[in-house]
Image (tube, rainbow, N blue to C red):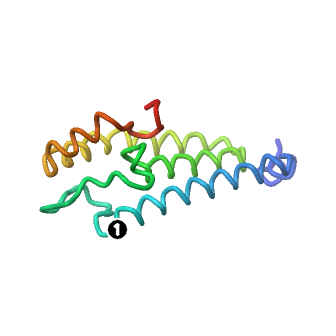
Amino acid sequence: MASSATVCARRPRTIFVAGLTIAALGQALRLAAARELGESFTFKVHTHPEQPVVQTGPYWLIRHPSYTGALVCALGFCLAYGNWLSPAMVAFLIGGYVHRIPSEEAAMLEGMGSGYAEYMLRSKRLVPFIF
């Protein structure tokens, strides 16, 4: 049985570099999303009075670019390292977002009302034009 170091050593360098590049792009999207929201970016699901519906930057096309960035980053690491545990960790991350996104959107609808409802109609959750 080959050790994980041996398996990584056999991975073509281009796949490793491509994976790390994808991971970096995912992280850049996540940071851009946080920067665009400013003070409204929190880890707790809530809104504050008079919070605007942000529809600029990465929010122009998708409602949850921070989550998209995290998933792209995780998938990049899967590609780079080729470890059997990597897809399991991505599945765990997806499971968390499947639970969190509906609660977050319900809180946004309650706190921001029709402005957020209209935004939901014209944008996708995670993948522009698709989902």
Residue 83 sits in quarter: top right
Residue visible at 61% across and 55% down? Answer: 25
Rendering coords of residue 122 (x, y %): 33, 36
Residue 86 sits in quarter: top right
> Amino acid type of disc 1?
Gly
Nearest the viewer among 67 and 58 is: 58
Image quarter hosting the N terminus: top right
Residue visible at 20% across and 57% down? Answer: 46
* Label 1 packing within 10 angstroms: few (<14), some (14-19), many (20+): few
4 shown above or below 119: below
Image quarter hosting the C terminus: top left
On the rendered structure, is 67 left or right of 37? right
Q: Which type of secondary structure does the marked residue at label 1 adopt?
A: helix
Please give the residue where the numbered disc 1 appears in the rendered image: 38
Residue 125 sits in quarter: top left
Nearest the viewer among 20 and 108 is: 108
Rendering coords of residue 55 (x, y %): 34, 51
On the rendered structure, is 10 left or right of 115? right
Residue visible at 46% across and 45% down? Answer: 93
